[in-house]
Structure formats: structure tokens, C-alpha cells
Amino acid sequence: MIQLYYHPSPNPAKVALYLEESNTPYEIVVTDTRKGDQHQPEFRAINPNGKTPALVDGDIKVFDSTAIMLYLGEKIGQFMPPATPAAHAEMYSWLMLVATGIGPYCGQAVHFKHFAPEPKAYAVNRYDFEAWRHWLLVEERLSRQPYMLKDYGIVDMSVWGWARVIPRVLGEGAWDKLPNVKRLLDEINAKPAAQKVEAFATQFSFKTVVDEDARRILFPSNERLKA
């Protein structure tokens, strides 16, 4: 059975959503990043980069959420576009926008807005600007069509993973400028598969506070400042 190494954050959530939507049997392996599970040798043997999610499928190990989504889509054959060069080029383009744009810039925006010490005005401005810029590309796309591609699929699931945290990234008023992203989010949130994934946060035991121990684990680069 597939094992999904999981923490209730955007990238693991989108993989779990795919597995639920495709009715694929799998097992959750709790990987509490605030306790440092991602740095344990047994996890690093699966993902040397030390981040969730990671997936084990028999003898196959896959890390990085976008790689996992593509692996599952190709293996299971659901929620993928037609197997044509044009359709796959479109899928790859938008998947990579989420992977290299939305994810990293939203992550850094959250870090500098909510965790970094002062002075941080320059960093907050940069990452907030870039997070908005990427989300507005998605908004424009969704203003012209119901889904990121022709039909609901893995790109929408990837967008959903991060759209869930938009208020924390961009502020509570963000939905006023992203009504079509909100429409897609609400549609996916109404699905039983998404509701099951959201319930994992309380179904399994995860550390919910970011105390000094968690900060040391999550932001190891800060340790160099103490030297």
C-alpha cells in the first residue's frame, strides 16, 4: 500500500486530495515537521531534502509534491489531461507555476510576515508583491474558465493546497481581489475528499504551536546568527 508521509500543510494536502479523489488506498505516516520528524534518518532516506510530503509505493520512493502528483497521475491515470503534447505542455506550465512561484513566494511571505524578526519591511514587501503577482495570474486564468485546464484535475488540486492559506499569506481581504480563486476553493472544499483531508489535522496528532524548539527546527539557518 502507498505510504504518504504527511504534515497538514499545503503541499502534503494536495497529494492527499489526489489520493482521496482517485479512491487510491494509502496510509498516512505522520511526519510532524514542528517536532523535527523530517530530519530523522529514516525520513531522510526517503526524502534527502527533509521536507514533506514524501511517498513510498512498494520499492518506489518519490519526494517533492509536484513530482508526487505527476507520478500518481501517470500511474493511476485519473485527473490528467489528454495524452497529447499540447495538453501536457499546458499542464506542466501551470503545475510549475504553482511549484516554483506560488509555493515558494507564499511560504516566504508567511515567514517574513509572521515569524521573522525586525527589520523585515523590505522582505515583506518583496514576497507579498510576488505572492500577489502569482495569484493574480491564477485569478486571471480562472476568470476565463472553470478550471486551470479544460477539466478538473491535478493542477486544480495543487492550487487548492495553497489557496486554503491565502488569508494568512495575503491578508483577510485578499478574496476581494481573487473571487475566482475563491470560487474554485469553495467548490473543492465542498467535496468529501477535501473534507476528509482537512480532518487529518485533528484526526492525527500534530504539534500546533511554533515555540522556540519548533523555530529551531523549522528555521535552522537562524542558528548561524547565534554563533
Image (cartoon, helix red, strand yellow):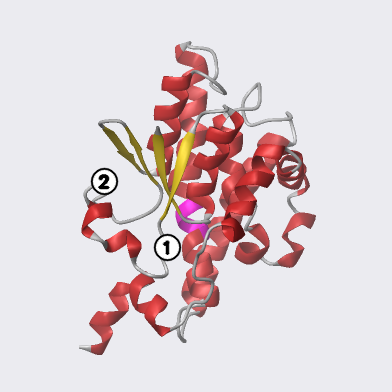
* Residue 109 sits above or below residue 83 on the image: below
Q: Is residue 7 magenta?
A: no
Counting other residues with Cα less than 10 Å from the Cα at mark 1, is it few (<14), some (14-19), or many (20 or more)?
some
| Residue 32 disc label | 1
* Residue 207 sits above or below residue 185 on the image: below
**What kind of secondary structure does the magenta stretch mostly adopt?**
helix
* Residue 117 sits above or below residue 156 on the image: below
Q: Secondary structure at mark 2?
A: loop
* Amino acid type, label 1: Asp
Q: Earlier in the sequence, mark 1 or mark 2?
A: 1
Residue at the image point whose x is 48% and y is 80% from the top: 120
Residue range (magenta): 102-106
How far apart in space, not on screen, are marks 1 and 2 (Cα)? 15 Å
Residue 95's spot in the image, x, y percent?
A: 49, 35
Residue at the image point whose x is 59% and y is 28% from the top: 153
Asked if one can make out residue 209 in the rendered structure from this viewpoint, the answer is yes
Residue 105's spot in the image, x, y percent?
A: 48, 57
- The residue that mark 2 highlights is 46
Q: Quadrant of residue 39?
A: bottom left
Q: Quadrant of the C terminus?
A: bottom left
| Drawn side of residue 12 relative to residue 184, left or right | left
* Residue 128 sits above or below residue 209 on the image: above
| Drawn side of residue 125 relative to residue 171, left or right | left
Q: Is residue 104 magenta?
A: yes
* Amino acid type, label 2: Ile
Q: Quadrant of the N terminus?
A: top left
